[in-house]
Image (spheres, rainbow, N blue to C red):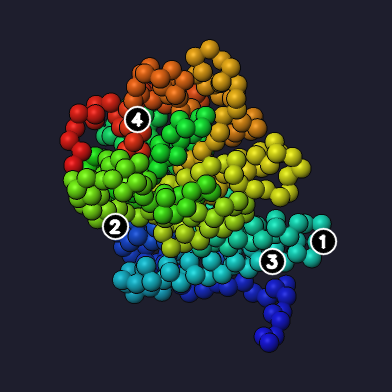
Amino acid sequence: MAEPVAPTKDRVPPQNPDAEIAVLGSLLIDNQTIPEVAQILERGDFYSRDHQAIYDAIVELFDQGKPVDLVLLTEALRHRDALDRVGGAAYLVSLLEKVPSAANAEYYAGIVRQASVRRRLIHACTEIARDSYDGTVPTDSLLDRAQAEVFAVTQGDRSNEPVAVRDVLQSIFDDIENIRESRITGLRTFFNDLDDLTCGLQRSDLIIVAGRPSMGKTTFALNIAMRVALGGWPRPNKAEAKPVLIFSLEMSKPVIARNILCGYARVDAHRLRRGLLPREEINALTMKAGDLYEAPIYIDDTPGLSLRDLRTRARRLMLTEPRLSLIVVDYLQLMEERQAENRQQEISIISRGMKALARELNVPVIALSQLNRATEARDGHVPRMSDLRESGSLEQDADLVILLYREEPYNPGARPGEADLIVAKQRNGPTGTVTVTFLKNYLRFEDRSQQDQPHF
């Protein structure tokens, strides 16, 4: 058995002052290394507060488009009232003298980063150890927090640290340029009218897709997941393909995969189940299966999944698939939360947890939800946001609410093959209704402009 580790009190935290000096000297020698190092390090990665101040001034000068030399750096630190604290101009000169060249700047930055990660791990584990001695903290909460803390370290997450407004403003102007080029700021669903209304699915957003049974909620969500993973529609684009994770609490992996394949190949799913496919549809399945074989779609069909288990599995996939871009949960009311005292509280906890997961992983999370029976008694049966089942917290926590409605199930022959995507809530945009085509037998939604396009 390993010997217990001594307490961290009075022990020097991991650090490498020489590597920190080498990084700063390299940046002064060759300004072209600043963008590469900035991708690796942030201010807090330096252990020395003096080095933090120097690095921050260097990056700010570079962001302003100014040359980073001793004269301008000295003036920048003096303007911040930090020059004397860091050792004056003489210390800045010494940084240059101690580094022969900037050739190894990224290597030195990696050493500084490793020490920073170790310090953050020590801090996280110390906090967890302290709370573990506190018998009032629930074990499930401790486990979830431990996973979240370690995951944040591995991902380099600094979302809880203060950020200068200049950095936020820069990202805003980057978004403005992207909007001018493509009008889409988020993840494209490739439902063009929906993307025009929402500007795509935004990172860290919780998206609720709700409807009464048999409206096509699962099919719609799987269609979005398929299009994202294929990278384009109606033709795939491997260069734009993005990993997606589907949690199916109702259907098995083979059923999900079969439904995705039928939707993509535009093959009658009912005839497939009965073994009545004509040869041309079998050929279509075979051809389209090749595209899906390479698509980064991940399916978890564990029934009765808890919020903690779902978060754990999503974090684990993010470690192996850091480009994970979308999570789909089908559906929210089938999840379990044992700590809740009643069903309404249970859904509230799950809803808040879904939103927290979207923010933690910085991806949109689509959660499917049932609507209550109020729509059945209403003239026209058109759903409202107040129909969200079992909890008003869904309405509160969601950034985007899409209510799926088809008239045909209520009035056979009325608006055949049409479905309304009612955007009932959009936290940062307008509401509205988008009408699409629903091909029920093919398990496929399409833009109305796609109806007449060839499908093989």
What residue did someone put label 4 on? 438
Q: Identify the element where label 1 is drawn.
A: loop
Q: Name the residue under label 3.
A: 126
Q: Is residue 210 left or right of residue 239?
A: right
Query: Regarding mark 4 in the picture, which secondary structure is present there?
Result: strand
* Amino acid at circle 3: Thr
For the C terminus, give its image quadrant.
Answer: top left
Q: From the viewer's perspective, is the residue at label 3 or at label 1 nearer?
A: 1
Q: Can residue 449 be seen in this view?
A: yes
Q: How far apart are marks 3 and 2 (CA)?
A: 43 Å
Is the Cβ of the residue at disc 2 closer than 8 Å to that at disc 1? no
Label 2 vs 1, first from the N-terminus: 1
- Where residue 347 appears, as percent x and y from the top left, is 65, 39
Residue of label 1: 135
Q: Which residue is drawn at 60% across and 25% down?
A: 373
Separation of disc 4 and disc 3 at Cα? 54 Å
Contact between labelled residues 3 and 4, with CB atoms less than 8 Å apart: no
* Upstream in sequence: badge 3 or badge 1: 3
* Three-letter code for the amino acid on which mark 4 is drawn: Phe
Seen from the viewer's position, the closer of residues 72 and 320 is 320
